[in-house]
Amino acid sequence: LSQSNQFCDAGVGYPESTCGFSSSSSSKLLIKGGTVLNAHQQEVADVYVEDGIIVAVKPNIKVDEDVTLLDATGKYVMPGGIDPHTHLAMEFMGTETIDDFFSGQAAALAGGTTMHIDFVIPVNGSLVAGFEAYKKKAKKSCMNYGFHMAITKWDESVSREMEIMVKEKGINSFKFFMAYKGSLMISDELLLQGLERCKSLGALAMVHAENGDAVFEGQKRMIDLGITGPEGHALSRPPVLEGEATARAIRLAKFVNTPLYVVHVMSIDAMEEIARARKSGQKVIGEPVVSGLVLNDSGLWDPDFVTAAKYVMSPPIRESGHDKALQAALSTGVLQLVGTDHCTFNSTQKAFGIDDFRKIPNGVNGIEERMHLVWDTMVESGQISVTDFVRITSTEWYDFIGTVLFIVTFFCFQIYSL
Ligand SMILES: NC(=O)NCCC(=O)O
Ligand SMILES: [Zn+2]
């Protein structure tokens, strides 16, 4: 936890030890007798933590009397979750997400996630200005976070600033939008240049894969048919458009010979493209999000606009069947890790699209619910093991991004009942 945060400043009943460590006293904690989990193994052991840093993990650690004891017998002790895909305080579709870096992170912590990676959106195309703006937004943070960077246009200065991000600012993953025509979307020509640049910088290229031109046409088609409600959102951008863009991005990444990370894989169509590419040996990573794993599109058909609009996100939550197929792909290693795409708007904001689904701000929640929903649907059902749970909700990210972000989240353990 940061030394100073809103919990501490507000003094809402949190002891000093929760609000960072004073220079005069050190904090010592022994978590005793739990089943310690990581992505590869589990063992009954004690965990000794000094000043927020894990010093030892082994059975029967003996400590002095000044150490705080926490009995974890009969419980799992595991790393805090890492959500690799969030949008806090993001300006989007004429408004700003209702969760900022404090309220979103408070929700994350309540659900066992201790780190998230948010997407910096450039300001007028400038990555440096976007980075500075997000540093300001993130000042209210109460947990660990990192940044990806979205690329929303392409020119020489963007290319130069990508290097600054990688070499000076610690950002080494860049997302390209193949959707949102007229705002965030970039052309294939620019995507290709972006992929080349990622390759030359050793950075990871990410894509939001939907065919933005076809989505635009699909939206017009729905409006012409008089379908203006939230169901029109899903009808206008069917799975085939996600599959097409995923296949295109994969082929362009292959042409450039650089790894590709596909964010929010929502359909069988996209998942199968990833499966095919991986089988052929191409380095493609697929990230399902918790809404796609546990929901289906029935919410979008709710006659109550307020309810239906809550389910509007892109790519859309799909018909029943896609959810189970994505779970199966995750459990068999076709897809690798679970994000949320947490991007929340309240009912007033969602109501911008009361007469036209194209104006409903796109995004759903999940940062608080991700860990327990994956546990409930996939561990409890026996689809994945407890160590797999740790891998797909926490540690897998580091396998992709290397050692740049050392496993800070291990500082914050979450305890789950056996
Ligand atoms: N996914 C979504 O609906 N909103 C957030 C922006 C994005 O990731 O596309
Ligand atoms: Zn997103």
Image (tube, grey):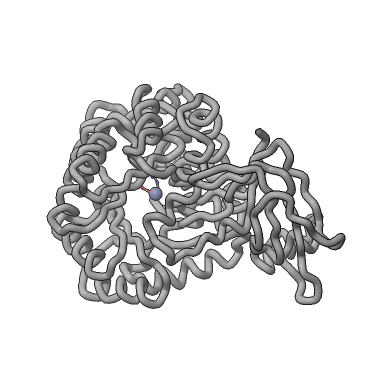
State whether residue 132 appears in this view: yes
Is the C terminus in the top left, top right, bottom left or bottom right quadrant? top right
x, y percentage for residue 330?
Answer: 38, 36
Image coordinates for residue 113, horizontal then vertical, percent: 57, 49
Observer-nearest of 51 and 40: 40
Residue 308, percent from left and from top: 45, 29
Q: Is residue 264 left or right of residue 45?
A: left
Q: Is residue 55 above or below residue 219?
A: below
Looking at the image, residue 28 lies above or below residue 166: above
In the rendered view of the protein, which quadrant contains the N terminus? bottom right
Residue at 68% over, 38% down: 75
Q: Nearer the viewer, residue 160 or 371?
A: 371
Q: Nearer the viewer, residue 45 or 18?
A: 45
User: Which residue shows up at 39% across the image and 28% down it?
Assistant: 323
Residue at the location (21% across, 74% down)? 156
Write the residue at 58% across / 50% down: 80
**Residue 213 location, quadrant:** top left
Q: Quadrant of residue 338?
A: top left
Where is residue 176 shown, x and y percent of the image?
Answer: 28, 56
Number of callouts? 0
Q: Is residue 344 visible?
A: no
> Quarter of the image holding residue 163?
bottom left
